[in-house]
Image (cartoon, helix red, strand yellow):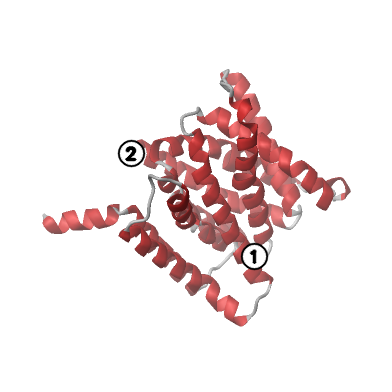
Amino acid sequence: MTTSAWLWLLVLSVLWGAGFFFNKLLADEIPPLSAALGRVGVAAVFLLVLVRIMRASFNGLFRAWPSFLLLGLLQNAIPFSLILWGQGFIASGLASILNATTPLFTILIAHAATDDDKLSGARIAGLLAGFAGVAVMIGQDLLQAMDVNVAAQLACLLAAFSYGLSSVYARRFKREAPLPVATLQLWASTLILVPIAALIDKPWALPMPSATAGAAILGVAIFSTALAFIIYFRVLAQAGATNTMLVTFLAPISAILLGAIVFGERLSLHHFAGMAAIALGLALIDGRPAQFIGASFRK
């Protein structure tokens, strides 16, 4: 990736890492589906206003509504709801680490669904190391009991799988301007979640959210969703699906720090061991650390 792509990736990691912090603020007050609807709905309105201000053009993208509905389902509706539910039971830092498996799923899906992004020996080694890390993190809890804590972790993994599907599917929009694409996929997500949240949560019957929850909705919608997706589609066009998903490993840094400082969350040793294995897997997949070390030895 270029230096510019790496810088945008770092910005995106902070925005998405903060999203786990905002989710934790919402978890105790607003049901997952309604929180996910608030997140995409506010973000969709914000981006539409931005489109009007910047006079961006949709260039016939409305004809691709079926594609945007599928993208909105895979990239927002499913993973946002699963992560919001999971964070009601596990630490935000742990949820973000489990989300860091997204590149692993992306690679497997890209291998099966594309002709130009196939598995190599290094990628297979990276996948094995990464999924070993997942086993280290979840295995201990799974052996003790299949309780809600394990279910929450599995929900976060399923969200990562959905992100992997969406990142490969989103490649069809890589030649389009990021702002219109991000706007339409968020409006599609809103259309999907409105009837589901109304049917299950009945949000009109819920207590009025606190000022903290309201601020969290605005924060996660504007910063961790609207602005983040503009950057996401920009990096996707520059660096490809697999490289873009490396952001999910950088995001836990800010998520863990915010969780520790604000909520007093403390992760166990096996969580960090699993994170280290996932990091090793992503390093093997990326290949550049090995190239750098090899070049250093040759000097």
Distance in Å between CA atoms under marks 1 and 2:
36 Å
> Vertically, is 129 above or below 283?
below
Category of crowding for the residue at label 2, using alpha-carbon neighbours closer than 10 angstroms: few (below 14), some (14–19), many (at least 20): few
Residue 266 in the image: above or below residue 189: below
Q: Amino acid at mark 1?
A: Ala
Q: Nearer the viewer, residue 113 or 197?
A: 113
Q: Residue at x 82, y 52 (%)?
A: 200
Q: Tell me the element at label 2.
A: helix
Q: Which mark is residue 152?
A: 1
Q: Earlier in the sequence, mark 1 or mark 2?
A: 2
Q: Can you give x and y, in whole percent of width and height, for residue 36 in the image?
A: 69, 47
Image x and y of residue 33, in percent? 73, 50
Q: Which residue is mark 2?
A: 3
Q: Circle 1 — which element?
A: helix
Q: Nearer the viewer, mark 1 or mark 2?
A: 1
- Residue at 44% across, 46% down: 114
Q: Are marks 1 and 2 in contact (CB under 8 Å)?
A: no
> Which residue sits furthest right?
205
- Judged left or right of residue 19, residue 275 is left
Answer few, some or many: residues within 10 Å of disc 1's Cα (few below 14, many 20 plus, some between 14 and 19).
Answer: many
Q: Relative to 27, is 265 on the left or the right?
A: left
Query: Where residue 239 sits in the image (x, y, percent)?
Result: 39, 40
